Image (spheres, rainbow, N blue to C red):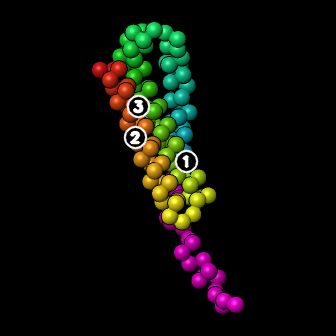
């Protein structure tokens, strides 16, 4: 039988002092997506089914390209933060760190690839 005080049992399980910042980041990015996703749908929707030349000419204009780029960046950063919370809640041990690093790298790689594609079209 272990004679541990409540404080000793809780030692190391306390606050990481980052929860408020993370929650704030998620709230700001979700509010941004609340505005950006409808804008993206209304700018991207008319181009569905159009020929390649028409789509390239449309996204060469600044407004559709900026909306697409902002939606992509904010969406992947929101995804990164959400998946990090999911992994922290349900995965334990060394696999937690491996998966968090992998998802962060995947998110930044996908956002960078999307931005590169939009830049190639827009410029």
Residue drawn where x is 57% and y is 72% of the image:
13
Mark carried by residue 109: 2
Q: Nearer the viewer, residue 76 or 61?
A: 76
Identify whether 22 is placed above or below 109. Answer: below
- Tell me if mark 1 has few (under 14), some (14-19) or many (20+) residues whose alpha carbon lies within 10 angstroms of its own: some
**Res 118 label:** none
Looking at marks 3 and 2 on the same chain, the residue that comes earlier in the sequence is marked by 2
Marks 2 and 1, how far apart at CA? 17 Å
Q: Is residue 93 visible?
A: yes
User: Residue 120 is drawn in which quadrant?
Assistant: top left
Point out residue 63 in the picture as x, y percentages from the top left corner: 40, 20
Secondary structure, mark 2, is helix
Q: CA distance from mark 1 to mark 3?
A: 20 Å
The answer to whether residue 51 is above or below residue 10 is: above
**Dot 3 lies on which element?**
helix
Callout 1: SS: helix
- First of labels 2, 1 by sequence position: 1
Horizontal arrangement in the rendering, residue 64 relative to residue 36 (left or right): left
> Looking at the rendering, in which quadrant would you find the C terminus?
top left
Q: Residue at 50%, 54% (x, y): give it.
A: 99
The stretch in magenta equals: 1-22
Residue annotated with mark 1: 82
The mark lying in front, picked from 2 and 1, is 2
Horizontal and vertical percent for residue 55? 43, 13
Q: Quadrant of residue 67?
A: top left
Q: Which residue is mark 3?
A: 114
Q: Mark 1 near mark 3, Cβ–Cβ under 8 Å?
A: no
């Amino acid at each position: 039988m272990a004679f541990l005080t409540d404080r000793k049992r809780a030692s190391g399980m306390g606050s990481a002092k980052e929860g408020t910042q993370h929650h704030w980041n998620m709230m700001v990015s979700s509010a941004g997506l609340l505005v950006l996703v409808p804008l993206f749908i209304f700018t991207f929707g008319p181009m569905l089914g159009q020929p390649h030349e028409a789509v390239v000419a449309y996204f060469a204009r600044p407004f559709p390209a900026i909306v697409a780029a902002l939606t992509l960046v904010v969406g992947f950063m929101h995804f990164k933060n959400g998946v990090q919370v999911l992994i922290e809640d349900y995965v334990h041990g060394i696999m937690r760190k491996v998966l968090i690093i992998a998802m962060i790298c995947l998110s930044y790689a996908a956002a960078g690839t999307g931005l590169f594609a939009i830049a190639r079209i827009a410029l």
